[in-house]
Image (spheres, rainbow, N blue to C red):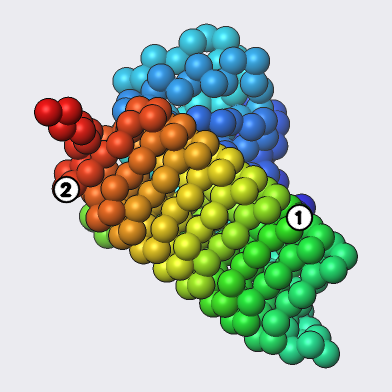
Amino acid sequence: MGEKFVEYNVRELDNRYNFTVGGVSYIGNPRAHTAMYVTKKVAHLLENMKGLACCLVFAEEGIVVAPAFREKNCFMFSDNPQLAYVRFAEQLARQREREERSKKYIRTEEGYYLGENVRIGENAHIEPTALIGHDVVIGKNAFIGAGAVIKNAVIGDDFVCNAHAVIGSPGFTMCEDEEGNKLRIPSMGRVVIGNFVEVGVGDNISVGSSGDTVIGDYVKLDVLIHIGHDVHIQKNAELTAGAIVGGFDQIGERAYCGLNAAIRNRVSVGADGFIGMGAVVTKSVEPGVTVVGNPAKKYERNKS
């Protein structure tokens, strides 16, 4: 996918710098020529900027930034860096929205809808009423069920997307303006899906807020599952019906999530972790550990 955004020269914000910014990224995985924000809560992630240049960083007052970082990147300090970032990102989002609306969909002979610049591999079967958005890439041997919607996505081979799933929906992230009004943070990322992945009926997978939501090879998702923005699910993980995964979560290889379990945002489940049915996970789960209950706690088998 190659969306092109209007580029802004940061010289308009600080005349000591002369480089352009044409996208956004997350401070946990920053990219050159992008904008991002950092609060004191995640200030330790600034270490990810080592060797990086040409970033526009909206930072919270009081954060100490190494001179080497400030030399090659433009830092704008404020009491509310998230809001400052949102005001900037909204300009990029509006540009993308204008470009999206200028593109056209066609209704194919098979009865599904296809956007512009879509690439779909050989031997794909797409049922009527499905919609494939602009610039989407899907590998070979795909099955796309009736009513499915796929946007802002790059998908591998042997993909199964069952009926009425939505891939590439906006993330649900908010900030407050000066009057306390809720503002939605623009969702500027993608969904990146590996090979042999299955998505169940009625699932929702959100795009990354400023990075990507990533689903690894052989991940299997049952029905009515919600995957939040910027989630990373690693190879061979299995999530059963009704599971909810919050934004920025990390789900390790071969992890299992039971029926109707909920995982709060910004936590991780280690490799081979097991989340019991209906569990409410509020803290990270170490590799190989089973947790159950609300709030979820480590399950200790009675050895007596």
Compared with residue 147, is residue 279 higher up or lower down, i.e. above or below?
A: above
In the image, what residue type sits under mark 2?
Asn
Does the image show residue 39? Answer: no
Foreground: 16 or 213? 213
Labels 2 and 1 touching (C-beta < 8 A): no
Q: Give the labeled residue for mark 1.
A: 157
**Residue at far front of view:** 304
Residue 12, position in %: x, y? 60, 38
Q: Give the labeled residue for mark 2.
A: 294
Quadrant placement of the C terminus: top left
Residue 133, position in %: x, y? 69, 70
Foreground: 200 or 299? 299
**Residue at far right of view:** 122
Quadrant placement of the N terminus: bottom right
Tag 2 secondary structure: loop
Foreground: 145 or 282? 145
Whole-Å distance between the Cαs marked 2 and 1? 38 Å
Q: Mark 2 Cα within 10 Å, few/some/many (few <14, many 20+)? A: few
Residue 141, position in %: x, y? 79, 63
Tag 1 secondary structure: loop
Q: Quadrant of residue 197?
A: bottom right
Which residue appears at 85% of the width and 68% of the height?
123
